[in-house]
Image (cartoon, rainbow, N blue to C red):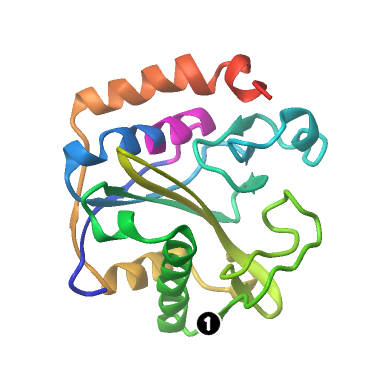
């Protein structure tokens, strides 16, 4: 992947609603940005997020962590706390990643993460088949091409692809690996050409507006 160029956006701790709004706005404006963006971020409080197509009444029974926010991507329920590493990737619609089938882009991002762990001295592997324990809950059981460490899933992701571009939201539960997040982030960036990126002020205002109007709304989070 060394021929690929990414904008890298290191985010400070933000609220759950802000984080979801930021990823959605990156997708909406990915063609305007014109380049892939890797956003590395964390949360200013513990929370849960769940897939766009899941039912709130069902997933709300699976976790005590609140708030519980509907993501702009599909996938299952994810707990976000101090032990989790979160990232997102966005690609404009003319980018080669946008043209990939969902299974291939999923496999590609987890192979990238696997190689980063290798550089940090941690051996992981891609899951070769579906493990159906706890369906609908992202880190109970595993999907094909999830990342596995010592028999347990430690990385999963969800995707949304439309005419604006491709959004991948990923979660890594790396506590048991014993490595620092900074090691993993540096290892991820070794494989690509990159430059640090910071949005203009209008972009931050757009995030705040989208967070308030959509992701803080019960109508959105409990819509189904």
Which residue is painted at 57% across and 16% down in the image? 217
Q: Position of residue 150 (x, y in %)?
A: 68, 80
Q: State whether residue 35 is above or below residue 155.
A: above
Q: Is residue 188 left or right of residue 4?
A: right
For the point 52% across and 82% down, the residue is 122
Q: Secondary structure at mark 1?
A: loop
- Give the left or right position of residue 135, taking residue 155 as reference: right
Q: Main secondary structure of the magenta part?
A: helix
Residue carrying label 1:
122
Q: Nearer the viewer, residue 177 or 53?
A: 53
Asked if the stretch drawn in magenta spans residue 99, the answer is no
Where is residue 15 drawn, in percent x and y?
Answer: 50, 31
Tell which of 115 and 181 is nearer to you. Answer: 115
Toward the viewer: 176 or 35?
35
Q: Is residue 20 magenta?
A: yes
What span is in magenta? Answer: 13-23
Q: Is residue 98 visible?
A: yes
**In the figure, residue 5 lies in which quadrant?**
bottom left
**Residues packed near mark 1 inside 10 Å, few (<14), some (14 to 19) or many (20 plus):** some
Q: Residue at x 56, y 44 (%)?
A: 74
Instruction: Confirm whether residue 172 shows in the render.
Output: no
The quadrant of the picture occupied by the C terminus is top right
Where's residue 191, x and y in %?
28, 74
User: In the figure, is residue 22 to the left or right of 68?
Assistant: left
- The answer to which image quadrant residue 171 occupies is bottom right
């Amino acid at each position: 992947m060394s021929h690929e160029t990414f904008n890298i956006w290191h985010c400070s701790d933000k609220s759950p609603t802000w984080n979801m709004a930021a990823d959605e706005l990156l997708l909406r404006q990915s063609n305007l940005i014109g380049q892939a963006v890797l956003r590395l971020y964390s949360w200013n409080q513990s929370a849960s997020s769940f897939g766009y197509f899941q039912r709130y009444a069902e997933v709300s029974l699976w976790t005590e962590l609140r708030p519980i926010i509907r993501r702009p991507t599909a996938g299952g329920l994810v707990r976000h706390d101090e032990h989790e590493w979160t990232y997102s990737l966005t690609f404009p619609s003319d980018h080669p990643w946008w043209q990939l089938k969902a299974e291939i882009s999923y496999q590609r991002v987890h192979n990238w993460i696997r190689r980063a762990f290798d550089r940090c001295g941690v051996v992981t592997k891609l899951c070769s088949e579906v493990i159906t324990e706890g369906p609908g809950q992202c880190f109970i059981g595993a999907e094909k091409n999830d990342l596995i460490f010592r028999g347990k899933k430690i990385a999963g992701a969800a995707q949304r692809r439309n005419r604006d571009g491709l959004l991948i939201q990923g979660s890594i539960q790396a506590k048991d690996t014993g490595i620092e997040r900074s090691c993993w982030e540096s290892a991820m960036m070794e494989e690509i050409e990159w430059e640090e990126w910071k949005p203009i002020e209008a972009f931050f205002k757009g995030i705040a507006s989208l967070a308030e109007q959509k992701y803080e709304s019960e109508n959105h989070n409990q819509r189904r």
